[in-house]
Amino acid sequence: MIKKKRTVLVGTILLHTLLILLVYMFQGAIFPFLRIGGLVPLMLPVAVTGIALYEGRDMGGICGIFAGVLCDISFNQPVGTFTVLLTLVGLGIGILSEMIILSSFVTYYIGCAAVLTVCAFVQMIPVIAQQNDIPSSILMSTAIGQTTYSLIVAFPIWFFVRALGKRRERLSPAARD
Amino acid sequence: MKAIFTRRTIIIFSTALLLAIISIVSINVMSSSGPVTGFANVVTRPVRELASTVARAFGSIFSAIYDYEAQVARNDELQRRVAELEANYREAHDLAEENAMLRALHDFRERYSGYESEMASLSSWNSDNWSSTFVINKGSSNSNIRRGMGVATEYGALIGQVFEVGATESTVITVLDTKFSAASFVGRRDSGGEEDSYVTVKGDYTYLRTGLLILDTINEDLIVRSGDSVVTSGYGGVFPPGLTVGTVEEVFRHAGGIGRFATVRPNLEFERLTTVFVITEFENPT
């Protein structure tokens, strides 16, 4: 029984690691060459939101750290801001999904929109600190464009996180609680 | 109902916080990105390089399809500009002026030629929409690259500046980034004094997505026109003189009417960069 549980856990961690790496490859290496309107979508925060929603706080938090480190690297910045932010996202969404909200497509999209908005504002801060005469319309258009583009790519990611969530439920129904 | 702050939740969050603190302390104490970022960069490097190779092949197909309408619009724009240029060409005064400008630029480059550089390959571009940076495969352990050095193409077009140096990789900010600025020379000397032609060129977030940078606060006496060339002056000692920054696109007056600025289009295609040259040594004219 314990052996089976361990096998399931190892498999789950491995699959989530693969998913995060795949998403990182797309965000960090593929999409910078496929900019639309000069914008690149944020995919790692979306993946963390989905994983936390379907897997709970533990997996959400661990994936948050991992995705956060990769996110900081893909932005060519030192590990820090997104490592903490995405860990908080993973833990926060995970706690909410365990206690209050349902794991569904609608809650996934609402969660993604909220997280992406927070990410855009966090990214805005150093730019404003560097150059304080930027028109707010320019900042808002980038934030809205980035969030919208990211929400479009959130759709295919949902299939993956939902499939992983279903797999976990099938193999060990009580694991999340 | 489960407790919000369980032991595991606190451990996970503390781990993230610890990683961030190590990173912040490293930046401030060692002036480098630190062991956490360095380790993560080394581990993910093969993945990034593999993905970049795939992305380049994929990107060229995508851009051919995606750029079709843009190419048609660009073609119309080019035809309009050709007509404008033909009209200008007939004017003898402008021709003479243009000649003088080109001669000045040529003299400028001849006077300050010669610098040492280190070749590096581009590993990956940043994927956020708030800055313009990329990573090269040379760092402090495998080259003489140091923070602040200029980065250019083989044709002498300025790409940017080394912003952070890791052990085996370095981060470069491009000329479009808000952290970038360089002392430059506009290739026109109508106002007489050569000193009047020196300006500061810098990245501006307003124009980041359109791929432009700006000539900041142009002297009222200086005549700057669309099509003027902008090259580095070498003053300040950061960049060698004579590197091409770009071409003036449009001149604007600041809001409130005080002072002017101009947009500059860099003379290079960032998407096609694969190899860059980091300028490690050069003769300073000052």
Image (cartoon, grey):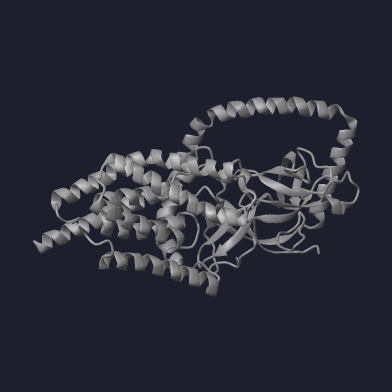
Q: Quadrant of residue A136?
A: top right
The answer to whether any part of residue B5 appears in the image is: yes
Task: From the viewer's side, name the closer residue of A123 and A79.
Answer: A123
Position of B188 with respect to A28 (left or right) is right
Taking A3 as reference, is A52 above or below it?
above
Which residue is at 70% across, 62% downward? B238
Q: Residue furthest bottom?
A: B29
Position of B98 with respect to B168 (left or right) is right
**Quadrant that contains the C terminus of chain A:** bottom left
Task: From the viewer's side, name the closer residue of B212 and A46.
Answer: A46
Position of B200 with respect to B44 (left or right) is right
Q: Measured from the top left, where is residue B58 in percent x and y? A: 44, 40
Taking A1 as reference, is B34 above or below it?
below
Q: Measured from the top left, where is residue B283 in percent x and y? A: 76, 64
Task: From the viewer's side, name the closer residue of A97 and B61.
Answer: A97
Which residue is at 82% across, 49% downward? B219
The answer to whether any part of residue B35 appears in the image is: no
Q: Measured from the top left, where is residue B173 in percent x and y? A: 59, 55
Which residue is at 47% across, 35% downward? B62
Position of A78 with respect to B47 (left or right) is right
**Quadrant that contains the N terminus of chain A:** bottom left
How many marks overall? 0
Q: Residue furthest front?
A: B1
